[in-house]
Image (tube, rainbow, N blue to C red):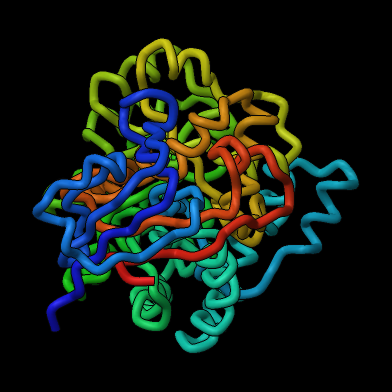
Amino acid sequence: MRQPQILFVNCRVATMTDEGPYGLIEDAAIAVSQEKIVWVGARNDVPAAVAAFALRDLGGRLVTPALVDCHTHIVHGGHRAGEFEMRLQGASYEEVARAGGGIVSTVNATRNASEEDLIAAALPRVDALISEGVSVIEVKSGYGLDIETELTMLRAARRLAALRPVTVVTSFLGAHAVPAEFKGRADAYIDELCITALYAAHAEGLVDAVDGFCEGIAFTPEQIARVFDVAKSLGLPTKLHAEQLSNLGGAALAAGYGALSADHLEYLDEAGVKAMASAGTVAVLLPGAFYTLRETQMPPVDLLRKHNVPIAIATDMNPGSSPLCSLLLAMNMACTLFRMTPEEALAGATVHAAAALGLADRGRIAPDQRADFAVWDIDHPAELAYRIGFNALHSRIIGGQP
């Protein structure tokens, strides 16, 4: 069915292009045809080619690109509220993990959940993000750590996009932790199970990118490299949890594979920043995990700025270290905890988040971009990061349709 051609008028548009702060256009108009933006600019400059499109008045509201949550673990079984209590009593993230909690405890709950169970648990979290203007959600596997459960998680993630008006991008995260049955045998896990599961998931069309956790409590750079070699052979892009708790050189490793992103990055050094800059790898900062784990080592935002590394912001929604279902709050945290500007935070949840997923047609309001945008009842785009616990969303427009 041919989509109607619409001219959205009477709005202020934060295009998130490089044309001035926020790319802001006062008294703007946006022309949409076939789910794509074909023109945007001042309403007085509307070209004749789009002037006959059906008008839709946005009531003087602010329009931004729809938000993109580029790092989540939103599909999982169970919860870890007990570990939250343990950390409040002084246990560190590593101590909880080594005591049998952490990722491995969620693995047990996820293995015991059916695909339907995982979907039912994930949908309220997906709905919370959609209600804040999110149009794209990245979803990782990594709580199965066996072949069948990894596939089940990815199948559940794919089905979320059929049940809700949202784009889901999947990441295979088999290299997330060593399961109990492979304790002390991380190399065997990588070679015998993780890589086998990756081949199976790819064959089923379930994988958009390949991720890993490069850390002392997870996998070494050498082990991650073996997984990334397979990803490369399959033509799949890579991304990496790196430098969250220590500096193992994971970001530089990821950059060496031309990774879409390196995520967390609290312990990233300048050499790693330079490697990311050379590769065009996006830095994904996750203030929800920083906050929940009560970390004190901030990611090197000034170094990322110095070397022009794009900075994305995401919720890292997961049951242990970031049970956060609000991208707006993540933007506020990025400003308050990491001293980012509100403009950087909005770019981090739109254009740079889209780049972290390899989505060149999202994240900006510009010709040839998909017509996914959010309409807000606010005066200025800085309010999105400024307010706490307040959702100013008026509506989402997806593919040009409310």
Give the quarter of the figure containing the C terminus: bottom left
Q: Residue drawn at (61%, 34%), measured in percent from left and top?
A: 334
- Please indicate whether residue 119 sits to the left or right of residue 195 in the image: right
Location of residue 206 with respect to 307 vertically, above or below: below
Q: Give the quadrant of residue 273.
A: top left
Q: Residue drawn at (14%, 84%), measured in percent from left and top?
A: 1
* Along the viewing direction, whichever of 237 and 94 lies nearer the viewer: 237
Q: Can residue 149 be seen from the camera position used here?
A: yes
The location of residue 336, given as percent across then percent down, is: 69, 30
The location of residue 126, given as percent across then percent down, is: 52, 70
The location of residue 367, given as percent across then percent down, is: 18, 46
Q: Residue drawn at (22%, 34%), measured in percent from left and top?
A: 257
* Along the viewing direction, whichever of 234 and 158 lies nearer the viewer: 158
Q: Residue drawn at (86%, 41%), measured in percent from left and top?
A: 90
Location of residue 254 with respect to 315 vertically, above or below: above
The location of residue 313, given as percent across then percent down, is: 50, 40
Q: Give the quadrant of residue 205.
A: bottom left
Q: Can residue 237 be seen from the camera position used here?
A: no
Location of residue 283 with respect to 235 vertically, above or below: above
Q: How many marks?
A: 0
Q: Give the quadrant of residue 192.
A: bottom left
* Along the viewing direction, whichever of 147 and 43 lies nearer the viewer: 43
* The residue positioned farthest toward the right in the image shown: 89
